[in-house]
Image (tube, coloured by chain):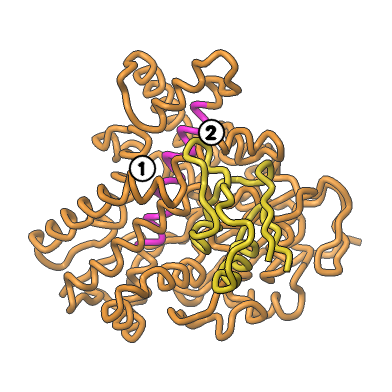
Chain colours: A yellow, B orange
Amino acid sequence: MHIAVEEEKCVGAGQCVLAAMEIFDQRDEDGVVVLLDAEPPEEQHAAARDAAAVCPAAAIAVRE
Amino acid sequence: MTVELPAMPVEREHPLDPPVEYHQLREEQPIIRIRFPSGRTGWLVTRFEEGSQVFADPRMSARRPRHDIAAEDGVDPHDDGATGVLDPGFVFMDEPDHGAYRRLLAGRFTPKSVQTRLQPYIDRIVTEHLDAIEAAGKPVDLIEHLGLPIPCLVICELLGVPYADRDGFHHATEAMMDVSKTQAERDDGARWLIGYITDLVAAKRADPSSEGLLADLVRTADQEDSILTDKDLISIGVLLLFAGHDTTMAMIGLSALTLLTHPSQRQELVDDPAKVGPAVEELLRYLTIVQFGLGRVAKEDVEIGGQRIATGDLVVVSMPAANRDPRAFDDPDTPDFDRKMTRHLAFGYGVHQCLGQNVARAELRTILPRLFERFPGLRLATPLDEVEMDTYGTNYGVRKLLVTW
C-alpha cells in the first residue's frame, strides 16, 4: 500500500487522524494533514482505507 | 401551463425521525424538482451517495440563496446572505478563497488541539453542572442546566468571549436561526451579534495580552500581509459564536432524549464506556440536526445520480434523509451503537464540512456517559409527546427537556 496526500486540497477537518492516527497527523498552525507513514504495515491498511473514504476534501489517495 | 411542484417536507410525526415523506421520496424520486419554503424551485436530494457527490463536487458552489425561509410579500429571499444582514463570509465561498480562510482557523479545531486545550475544561464544567443538577433537585430542565450552558462555556473559552454575555448572544442566535420569524426579526438578531463581536474585536485589539481565538485572529489580521479584514473578523467571530453553541445544544438535547427513550442503547453506553465514540457517531447520524438540509448552486451543467442539473440550479441535500438511506445504513431508523459505519453526513461533506465537529464530539462524548452514570434512574418527567421541540430552528432540537430521577 502506498499513501499520498494533497496538502493544497486539505481543509483540516481531522477525519484522517480520527480514522488512522498512526498514519496521519495535522500541522498545529493550520490543521493541514501531515503524512506520518506513506507505506503503513498491513494491520493498518483498513484504517488507511477508512481515512481516505472519510476525508471530506478527497485529499488522500491510497494505491494498493 | 404551470404544474404545481411538490413542497419540501417539513412536518414531523415523531420527534426523533425526519418527516415520513422522505421515505417515499428517497425510494421513488431521490432527486426531485421541488418548491422550497422560500418559494424558489430547485432540486432536493435524499440519498446518501448522491448527497455526498453534491457536497464533494467542486462544480457545486457554496454561494447559494437561502432556501429554508419563507418568502415575504412575494419576495424570494434570494440574496446571497445566509442570514440577511450578516455577511456569511467563507461559508459561502468556493476554493481557493474558502480554504485560505479556513486554514486560519483549522489549527484550533483539530482532534489534538481540542484534546489538549479544551478537554480538561470540558471535563471540569460537565462535572460542575452535574453537581449543580443534583443539588437543584428534581425535576430539572436538561437544556437549561446542561445542553445550553456547556456549549456556551466551551465556545466562550475557545473564542475568548465573556460567559456573562451568554444570554445576549444566545437570544440573538435564536432569533437569527428561527425560520418562523420575519426577516426583520432575524436581522435584529444578526445585528446584535455583529455589534457585539465588533465591540469585542475592538476590545481585543486594545489589549495585546488578550487570549483566545478571536484575539489570535485580530493579531493575524494586524499583520501586514494578512488576508483578514475587519469585516472578515466580524463575520468569522459571529459565525463561530452562533454555530459553536446552537448546534451542540441541539445535539445534547436530542441525544439525551434518544437515550431516555431507548433503554437498551442507554444501558450499552453505561456498561461499556469504550462505546462512547461509536455511540456519538451513531447519534449524529440518527439525529442529523440540520433539518432543512444545505444548498449548493451548479456552476456548470452537471449530472447527479443520472439527473441533469443545469447551470444556476439550486440543489439542496437533505442530510436527515440521506443519513437514513437504507442503501448506506442497514436498518437506518434504529440507533445501533455496533453499526459498522465509515462516515455520515451529519456534519456535511466536502470542503465545507463542519469546522467545529471535533469540539462537538468532545462535548457529547463527555456529557452523555457521565449524565447517565450520575443519574441511573434518569427519566422523562413528562410524556414524550409533551416534550417541547424546537421545530423552527435551522437546527432541530429540544427546547425544554424536563427530567427526574
Q: Which residues are magenta?
A: B233-252
- x, y percent for residue B379: 23, 77
Relative vertical location of residue B93 with respect to residue B51 in this rendering, above or below: above
Q: Which residue is mark 2?
A: B104
Q: Quadrant of the C terminus of chain B?
A: bottom left
The amino acid type found where label 1 is placed reads Ile
Q: Chain of mark 2?
A: B
The reply to whether the magenta stretch includes residue B240 is: yes
Residue B10, percent across and down? 58, 65
Q: Nearer the viewer, residue B76 or B141?
A: B141
Residue B282: say if magenta: no
**Distance (Cα) linking label 2 and label 1:** 17 Å
For marks 2 and 1 on the same chain, the one whose residue lies earlier in the sequence:
2
User: Which residue is painted at 63% across and 68% down in the image?
Assistant: A49
Q: Residue at x 86, y 61 (%)?
A: B303
Q: Nearer the viewer, residue B10 or B348?
A: B348
Res B215 quadrant in image: top left
Q: With respect to residue B82, does A48 lie above or below?
A: below
Which residue sits at x=52%, y=64%? A19
